[in-house]
Amino acid sequence: MMIEEVGYFLGKLVKSGDGLEGLKGGFERFFEELKEFRDFEFSAEIKEGKLLTRSKCPIHKYFKVWCDIFCLRFVEGFARAYGAKAKRIEKQPDYDFCVFEFEV
């Protein structure tokens, strides 16, 4: 799907390393651009061989279809640029944060 390819392209664009460390750095670099939005939060940590990301994201409020359909596909493409697989663990607004888990 096209949105997954966009995620892959953007993942490659900010890539400066491989594996989970590279993916963590890629997400941090990518989301650094969103720090100006007050209602957006992002954090990432590698734990027990997996990368966990947590974000508080306003997209579900403004563009629900993106959140429901396209967000996971975008993240899967981004992760593929680093050789990783993605899984969504929690999703706003059902939870306080969107949480994704990544494995190589």
Image: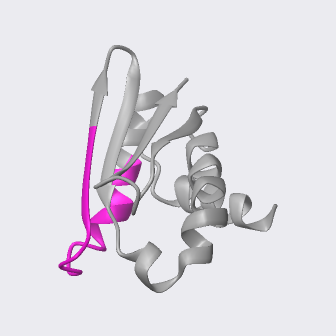
Residue at (62% x, 47% y) in the render: 76
Q: In this view, does 1 lie above or below 16?
A: below
Q: In which quarter of the image is residue 100?
A: top left
Q: How many labels does the image show?
A: 0
Queried whether the magenta region covers residue 31, the answer comes back as yes
Viewed as shown, does residue 72 lie left or right of 99?
A: right
Q: In which quarter of the image is residue 10?
A: bottom right
- What x and y, as percent, mark residue 26? 40, 50
- What x and y, as percent, mark residue 50? 41, 23
Direction bottom: furthest residue: 62
Is residue 57 in sight in this rendering? yes
Viewed as shown, does residue 95 lie left or right of 81?
A: left
Give the magenta part as a residue range: 26-44
Q: Can you say which quadrant of the picture contains the N terminus?
A: bottom right
- What x and y, as percent, mark residue 84? 58, 32
Residue at (30% x, 74% y) in the render: 34
Looking at the image, what colour scheme do you see? one colour
Queried whether the magenta region covers residue 83, the answer comes back as no
Residue at (33% x, 63% y) in the render: 31
Q: Can you say which quadrant of the picture contains the C terminus?
A: top right
Residue at (56% x, 37% y) in the render: 87
Q: In this view, does 44 lie above or below 34?
A: above
